[in-house]
Image: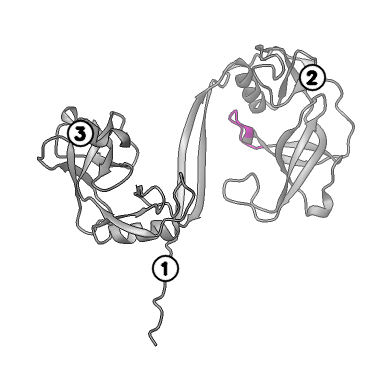
Amino acid sequence: MTAAASPPEVLRAPLVVEFPFTRSLGPVQSAFLTGLREGVVLGVRTSDGAVMVPPVEYDPVTAEEIRELVEVGVTGTVTTWAWNASPRPQQPLDTPFAWVLVRLDGADTALLHALDAPGPDAVHTGMRVRIRWAADRSGAITDIACFEPYEGPDAGEAAPHDGSFADPVTGIVAEARLDYTYSPGRAQTAYINALSERKTVGERCPSCHKVYVPPRGACPTCGVATTDQVEVGPAGTVTTFCIVNIKAKNLDIEVPYVYAHIALDGAGLALHGRIGGIPYDQVRMGLRVEPVWTEGGRYPDHYRPTGEPDADYDAYKELI
């Protein structure tokens, strides 16, 4: 009896996606964030008289622009909460805390932030809290360090505010980050392992017979599993492309350069790759290309012209 072959190990790797998002602020958001820097919380009054905190610039009911700013209290009431026993990096507190929605005194909507509490038993809906301000404030939501329990009275109604401050905040940079463990699954693990041998392997749908590269493990059109592996390429045809003129951070490629969709021979759809070995302004639809590998590389560094005549449009029009 022959022992069954062990299935290949499914790959896993930590992955971090992060980028700084820069945005300018309109008059309402500018006043709100500048107010936080100054220890003042501002909301906006909507057409039906409700006070929204954080403020918005357009009425959620009428879609009209709204500018009537009001100052609300720095104390409020918890409307709902959830305990966070394991804080993640960059969260407001590095010890266990509660995420809370707080309706500040004078507001009709709730603000999401952290509540510093010794444990979940110390938190309940309806509890009174107040803002704990950060020691250094710059005009960001993090100027509120967190909320803390409070036993004092209600601050009362919202008061009109003209939104004027010296040196207003006009723009912010929000650091977006997502870190997680990624597993490509059975199909893409086989695809990645084949790339390490300088092969490109897709999977064919048993129903429509389209070859997917990279494979997905199932046909998105027919909904059936794809298990029949097919080696495609290595050459292919440029179907569409774009010229990149902005240099990406940590990417050692001089601009301008071309990024293209490439239909490898035998594949049922195009994958993307960089085009090299040709001036960027000579890249064209139908250009025949082949992969260029670097020493020790696990995937093609770029694709270069093969020198063959351009492919006829009818040969790749369904792959655009």
> Is 62 left or right of 203, judged from the image as shown?
right
Question: In which image quadrant can residue 240 be found?
Answer: top left
SS state under label 2: loop
How far apart are the two marked residues, 3 and 1, measured between alpha carbons? 38 Å
The rendered magenta stretch, by its main secondary structure, is classed as: loop
The residue that disc 1 covers is: 9
Q: Position of residue 149 (x, y in %)?
A: 81, 43
Q: Which of pointers 1 and 2 indicates the residue nearer the eye?
A: 1
Tag 2: residue type? Ala
How far apart are the two marked residues, 1 and 2, measured between alpha carbons? 57 Å
Q: Is residue 284 above or below residue 235?
A: above
Camera-nearest residue between 86 and 237: 237
The residue that disc 3 covers is: 286
Residue drawn at 43 percent across, 64 percent down: 10
Label number found at residue 50: 2
Residue drawn at 65 percent across, 12 percent down: 65
Q: Position of residue 4 (x, y in %)?
A: 41, 79
Camera-nearest residue between 231 and 57: 231
Q: Position of residue 233 (x, y in %)?
A: 23, 50
